[in-house]
Amino acid sequence: MDWVLLAPISAFIAILFSIYLYSYVYGKSSGTAKMQEISGAIKEGARTFLKREYKTLAVFVIIMALILTVTLGVGLGMGLEIGLVYIFGAVCSAIAGFLGMEVALIANGRTANAAREGLNKAFPIAFRGGAVMGLSVVGLALLGVSIVYFSTGRPDLVLGFSFGASALALFAKAGGGIYTKTADIGADLVGKVEMDLPEDDPRNPAVIADNVGDNVGDVAGMGADLFDSYVASIMAVMILGASTSLQQSADSSFGDPSAYISLPLIFAGLGIIASIIGVFLVRVGKHGNPGKALNWGTYSTCAILIALTFLITYYLDFPLGIWGALAVGLIAGVIIGITTDYYTSIDRMPAKRTAESSKTGAAINIITGFSYGLISIFPPLLGIALASAIAYFICELTVGAGFGVYGVGMSAVGMLSIVGMIVAGDAYGPIVDNSKGIAEQAGMEEEVIDIADRLDAAGNTAKAITKGFAIGAAGLTVLALLAAYQEIIQTRMNGAQISFDLMNPFVLTGAFIGIAMPALFSAMLMLGVGKNAFRMIEEIRRQFREIPGLKEGKEGVKPDYTKCVDIAAKGALKELLPPSVLIIVVTLAVGFVGQWVASQIGPPYEFGGIQALGGYLGGSIFSGLIFALLMSNSGGLWDNAKKYIEAGHFGGKGSDAHKAAIVGDTVGDPFKDTAGPSLNTMITVMSLVASVFAPLIVAFALLLT
Amino acid sequence: MDWVLLAPISAFIAILFSIYLYSYVYGKSSGTAKMQEISGAIKEGARTFLKREYKTLAVFVIIMALILTVTLGVGLGMGLEIGLVYIFGAVCSAIAGFLGMEVALIANGRTANAAREGLNKAFPIAFRGGAVMGLSVVGLALLGVSIVYFSTGRPDLVLGFSFGASALALFAKAGGGIYTKTADIGADLVGKVEMDLPEDDPRNPAVIADNVGDNVGDVAGMGADLFDSYVASIMAVMILGASTSLQQSADSSFGDPSAYISLPLIFAGLGIIASIIGVFLVRVGKHGNPGKALNWGTYSTCAILIALTFLITYYLDFPLGIWGALAVGLIAGVIIGITTDYYTSIDRMPAKRTAESSKTGAAINIITGFSYGLISIFPPLLGIALASAIAYFICELTVGAGFGVYGVGMSAVGMLSIVGMIVAGDAYGPIVDNSKGIAEQAGMEEEVIDIADRLDAAGNTAKAITKGFAIGAAGLTVLALLAAYQEIIQTRMNGAQISFDLMNPFVLTGAFIGIAMPALFSAMLMLGVGKNAFRMIEEIRRQFREIPGLKEGKEGVKPDYTKCVDIAAKGALKELLPPSVLIIVVTLAVGFVGQWVASQIGPPYEFGGIQALGGYLGGSIFSGLIFALLMSNSGGLWDNAKKYIEAGHFGGKGSDAHKAAIVGDTVGDPFKDTAGPSLNTMITVMSLVASVFAPLIVAFALLLT
C-alpha cells in the first residue's frame, strides 16, 4: 500500500465527519421564537459580510492569478496551472471558512436552547459546532494539497495553492479584524457611553454587527489563518524534501527519492486521525468542567499523534530523528500555549497586578499591561528558538547533513498537524460567547445564563492556549518558509550557495526594512479601525436621531441592523486593501530593486537583491512575532484585568478602577483582535510572496549579470 | 606634524572653552531672592541624586573592574590596565555629567532673571549653559580616548575605556529615567489629581523632585548617553582600522599602517573644532526665533565639518571614499532628525490627528498615537539602513576590499562628531524648561513668562531633532560595534572566518533571544517606575497628612522636599539594578552556554556560541531600535497632542478631549523619558559586553575543542 494515500483518505474522512457533526448540530432544536429571531439576524449579518468579502477577494484573486499566469506561467514556462492552483487554494480556504461560519451561526442558538436542559446537553453542541470548522479546515486543506500534488507531482504548484490560501487568510483575518472592532467600538461608544444602553441592547443599531463580528473575526478569521499556516508548513517541508542536497545525503537504503516529499502528507493525515479521535474524547458530565474537557481533548490528541507518528516512522523505516523533530514541535506548541495562558489568565499575577494598578488611573493600567505584554514576548520566542534549534540538530546530526532545515519544517508540521482539534476548541469560543448573548437577549432564567456563562469562561481559557499555539506554529512555519525560499533560489541557480549573512549590507538593509513592515502594517490596520468606527458612529447616531421611538424602545420599532453591518463590512474591506497591497509591493520591490542595485555593484554582491529579500523576511519574522505576541497578550491581559475588577475586586463594577480598566480594555481590543493576530498571516503572506516570485527574481538576476 | 595630535589638542580646547562659557554663565546675575531660593532647592536635590547615583555606580564599577582585571587582565594576560581604563572611562563620563548638571543648575535661574531684560539677553545664557555640557562631553571623551591610546597604543584598551563610559550611561540614562518619571507621576497624581494643586505649586512635596528630574534625565542622562555613543563609535573604527585584512588591502602608497586607526581621532578632533565654531554662530536678535538659531547652529556645524574633513582627507592623502562615508552619516543624521520631528511636532498631521481622536476618549487617543508611533519607525530605520549600506559600498568599492565595515563605522563617527553641538542644543531644553518654572514660581510679569515660553518652545523643537540624531547615531554605532565584535573574534582566532548566517540555528536562536531583550528591559524599567511612584505617592500623602498647615499653604510651612528627592533617587537605583545586571548576564550566558552546547555538537558548529552571540546582538539591535523609536516618538506625540488641545483646539483645557489627552501623555511619559531613550544605551552596553569579553569566549571555545 502506498502510505501517502493516507493524506487524501483521512482528509476525506475528516470532511465526512464534519458533515456528520453538522447534521448532529442541525438536528437540535433552535429554541424559542425570540432566540430564532436574534440568531437569524446574526446569520443574515454574517452572510452579508462574507458575501462582500468574497466579492472583493474574487477580484483580488483573479488579478493575482493573471499576474502569476503571465509572469511565472507563460514568462518562465511554469505552465498555466500556477494561476489555477492559486485560485483553487483560495477557493478551498473560502469553502472551509463558509462552512465553519454557517455551523457556528446555527450552533449558537441551539447551544443557548440546550443550556435550559443542563451543561452536559449544551456543551457537545457548541464543541461539535466548533469541530465542524476544525475538521473542514484540515480536510479541505489536505485534500487540496493532495489533489494538486498527485495530479501534477510538483511541490512548486503546492506553493501556488498555499499562496492562494494565504490571500484568503489575509482578507479574513485582517478584514474580519477591522470589521469586528469597528462594530464593537461603534456599538460601545454610542450605545453604552452616549445613550447609556446596556450591553447587547436590541435598540442599539450596531448590536447585530457586534455579534456578527465575533463570528467573522474569531471563527472565519482564525480558521483561514490556521488553514494558511497548515498548508504552508506542509508545503515548505515538501519543497525542502525535494532539495537535491537532502536527496543526496538521505540514507541510500531508502529507495524512493520522493519519500521525503510525501512524508509531511502522511504525518498530516495521521494528525487528522488523531484530531478526530480527540474530538470524540471531549466529553463533559452534568457538573463537569468544560475547560478541563477541552484541554484534555488537546492533550490526548497530542499523545495519540506522537504514538501514531512513531509507529509509522518506525514501520516505514524512516529515520527516527524526523519523528523527534515533529514531537519537539508538538510539545513546544503546548508549552508556548501554557505560558501564554499565564500572562493573560484572569487568576494569575499579571492580570491581578494590572487590575490593581487601575486604582491609580487609566494611564498606569495601560503602562502596567503593556509592560507585562512586553515581558510575555520572551517565553514563546525562547520556545520557538529552542524548538527550531533542537529539531534542526536532531535531524542534521542523526539523519544526515542537509536535513536540519527539513527538521525545522517538520517541527512546524508537528505543531500544526493537530490543527483540527485546535480550531475545534477555538471556534467553540465565539459559539458559546454568542449563545450567552442570545440567552440574555431572549430573557432566559438565571440558571440558564449561569450555564452559558460557564461555557463561555471555558472558551476563554481554550482561546488563550490556541492563540499561543497559533503564534508558535506561525513562527516555526515562517522559519521553514525562509528555508524554502533559500532552497528555491538555490535550485533555480543550479545549486549555487546563497547565504543570508547579517554582516552583508544587502541582508542588513533588507532586515531593517523588514523589521519596519509589521509595525507599519499593524498601524494601518488600527488607524483603519479608527476611521471605520467613525463612519459607524455617524450612522448609529443618525438612526437614533431619525427613527422615531427607537431610543425610547417603543414596541415594534426596530433599528436598521443591516445598514450597520454593511457600513462596517464595506469600510473594513476598504481599509484592508492598502496595507495588503503594500506588503506585497514592498516585498517585490526589495527583491527586484535590490537586485538591480546589486547588479550595478557586481561581484561578489551580484545577488544582493536575493539576499536582501532573505534579510527582509528574517527581519519581518522577528518583528512580526514580537508585535503579534505583545499585542495579543497585552490585549488579553487588559480584558481579563477588567473582568477581574468586574468580579468584585478593587471596587468592582462602576468604580474608578473599573473605568480605568475599561480604557485599557478598549485599547486592547484592536491590539488583540485586529493587529496582533493579523501579523501571523502577514509574515506568512510575505514569505509566500518571496517564494512564489523567487524564480522570477532569479531570472531577473541572471538577465542582468 | 603628526595630525593625530589634533584630537587631544582640540579636546583640550573644548574643555577650556567650556570653562570660559561656564564663567560667562556664572557671571550673570542669579536674580531675586525668591528665584535663588527655588533654584537653590533644585540644585540641592540634583546633587543628592547625583551623589547617590555615583555611590552606587562606584560599587558597580569597582566590582566590574575587578572582574575584568581577573578574567581578562590576569587570566588572558591583557594586563592590569584593563581594569584601570574601565574605571577611567566611567570617571571621565561622570565628570562630564557632573559639570553639565552644575552649569544647567545655575543657568536656569540666571536665564529666568535675564528674561526680564529680553529674549536676546536670556537666550545666550541658556544656550551657553547647554554648550558647557556639550563641549565638556566631547572634550573629556576625546581627551580620555587620546590618553588611553597614546599611552598604550592599544585599541582594545580604548574598548575598555568605552565600556566604562557605557556603565555610567546606563546608570545615568535608565536610573535618571526612572527617577524623573517617579517624581513626575507622583507629583501629578497626588498634587494635581488628589489635592487639586496647580502645576509646580510649592506646597507639593514632590515639586522640587520633579524639577530635579528634568536635569537628571535630560541633561545628565542625554550627556552620558552621547558620551557613550561618541566614544564607542570612535573606538569601533579604531578596532576595525587595526584589522589585518584592512591593513593588507589598504593602498600601499600610504606608509604608516596605524593611520587608519588614528583617522577617527583626527575626524573627531575636527568635529570639536566645527562644534566650537557652531556654538559661536548661534545668535538671536531681540525679536529673533531661538528655534531657528539652534537649527542654524546645527546645520552650519555640519557644513563646516564636511568642509574641514574634506580638506584634511585630501591633504593627508587618504582615500576620499572614507570622507564620503563620514558625510553620508552626517547627512543621514540630519534627515533622520527632521523626519522624527514630523511625527512628534505639534503643528504636523500626526499630533493634530491624535489630538482630534481624543474627542472620542482616552482609548482612541492612545490607539492613534501608538499607531503613528509604529509608522514613525520606518523612515529612521530606512535612513540607518541606507546610510550604512551607502557608506559600506563607497568604502568597499572605492577604497578597497575589507573597508566596507570601516566605512559604516566612519559614518557613525560622522554623525557623532558634532555631538558637542548636539548636546549643547539638547541641554538647552531642560535649562529653559526649568527657567520657565522658576519664572512662574517667582511670580514674574507676563512678558517675562512669555519670553520664557518662547525659549522653551524652541527647546522642544531642538530636542526632537537631537533625539532622532541620538537614535540614528546609536543605530550606526551598534552596527559598527557588531563588526568590531566580529573583528575581535577573528583576530583572536588567528584570522578564521566567523559569519553570522541567519540560517545557522545558533545565529537564529541567538537572534530570537536578542530580540526579546529590549522588550524585557524596557518592561522592567516601566514597572520599576510604577513601583517607585507608588512609594513616592505614599510619602507625599504622608506629608500632607502629618505636616500641619501644609495643604492650606500657611505662611512659613514648607514640605520636606529632600525626603521626596531621596525616595525617588533611592528607589530609582534599586529598580535599575536588576535590568542592568540581567542584560550583562544574559549576554554572557548566550556566549558561554552557547559555546558549551556548540562544543558538544562539534564541527561545523564548533563556534556556535560565538555565532549565537552575533545573532543575539543583531536581534537586540533590531528590536532595540524599533522600541526606542516607537516609545520615544509616540510619547512625544501624545505630549504634543495634549499641548495642541491646551492651545485651544477641540475644546481646550478642561474639556473631555483634554482629559483623554492627559491619559495619553501620562502613558507616554515613561515611554519617552524612561524606556525609549534607555534602549540606545542598552544595546550599546550589550554590544560592548560582547566585544570586551570576546577574547574570553574565544579562549573558552578553544579550550573546549
Image: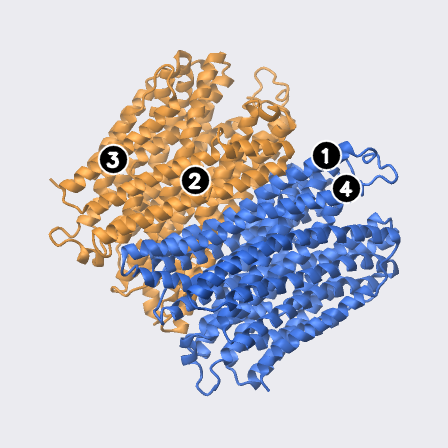
Chain colours: A orange, B blue
**Residue indicated by mark 2:** A173
- Residue A521 relative to residue B673: left or right: left
- Measured in 3D between alpha carbons, the distance from the residue under mark 4 to the one under mark 1, in whole angstroms, is 12 Å
Pointer 4 or 1: first along the chain:
1
Nearer the camera: disc 4 or disc 2: 4
- Residue A8 relative to residue A687: left or right: left
For the residue marked with disc 1, what is the amino acid?
Arg
- Measured in 3D between alpha carbons, the distance from the residue under mark 4 to the one under mark 3, in whole angstroms, is 68 Å
Q: Is residue A620 above or below residue A563?
A: below
Of helix, strand and loop, which one carries label 4?
loop
Q: Are marks 4 and 2 in contact (CB under 8 Å)?
A: no
- Measured in 3D between alpha carbons, the distance from the residue under mark 2 to the one under mark 3, in whole angstroms, is 28 Å
For the residue marked with disc 2, what is the amino acid?
Lys
Q: Chain of mark 2?
A: A
Q: Are marks 4 and 2 on the same chain?
A: no
Nearer the camera: disc 4 or disc 1: 4
Given residues B225 and A76, the one toward you in this image is B225
Q: x and y percent of residue B16 in the render?
A: 72, 73
**Residue indicated by mark 4:** B560
For the residue marked with disc 4, what is the amino acid?
Asp
**Residue indicated by mark 1:** B541
